[in-house]
Amino acid sequence: MTSTFPEISISTDRLVLRAFEPEDVPALTDMMSDELVRTWTTMPHSYTAADARTWVSLRAPAERAQGRGIVLAVHEFLTQRLVGTVRLRRTDWRLRATEATVVTGPWARGEGYAAEALLGVAHWLFEDQEFERLELRTAAGNTAAQQVAQKIGCISEGVLRNAWIVRDGEAAGRGRSDLIVWSLLPEDLDGIDPNW
């Protein structure tokens, strides 16, 4: 039997994290079409509404249903505007460990939403799901992602040399990058307010 995460909604002071819904497609399309998202992720360069619909209706739900992880849309609590997404993937149910990725829309950067969303997920993961390890991997040049990892209390564990491809602009130029591996354990959250 495959273990799976439950269908959930996580609330923080300013955010609600929940499964994607069809009405998220336009904002998701805009977010994933952003130049920085294209540079640091594996999203298609020409991310379309059809790509977003497939993600929302098929691929994201399959992550949870097949036990690989869970994908959550991140919305501002007051406006219900989509501001990002958090994905747990490469989940190891025996070790109670998973890897997190976070993307923030360009209209929501600089507000602390990425850190707040990850911290909310970490508290849920460790307290409710009894996981023992959350891992993040950030490209060596992605200083914003590294700052998020540090802000939530992650510990840098080392470098995976030449382990990522960074894409550059519409021409899809590619360059190799190291990945920094970060970890967060339940005890790392001691003293950190889950609601900020």
Image (tube, helix red, strand yellow):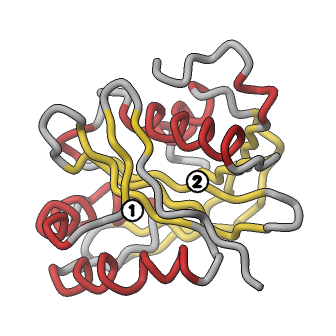
Q: Residue at x 36, y 63 (%)?
A: 19
SS for dot 1: helix
Disc 1 target residue: 39
In this rendering, position of residue 169 left or right of residue 191 = left
In this rendering, position of residue 63 left or right of residue 77 = right
In this rendering, position of residue 150 left or right of residue 97 = left
Q: Is residue 34 above or below residue 53?
A: above
Disc 2 target residue: 139
Mark 2 Cα shell of 10 Å, populated few (<14), some (14-19), many (≥20): many
On the image, the x and y values in percent for residue 120 come to 51, 36
Q: CA distance from mark 1 to mark 2?
A: 10 Å
What's under tag 1, amino acid-wise? Thr
Q: Nearer the viewer, residue 2 or 100?
A: 2
On the image, the x and y values in percent for residue 82 come to 22, 50
Q: Is residue 148 above or below residue 91?
A: above
Residue 114: quadrant of the picture:
top left
Residue 95: quadrant of the picture:
bottom right
Q: Residue at x 77, y 59 (%)?
A: 160
Q: Residue at x 67, y 56 (%)?
A: 179
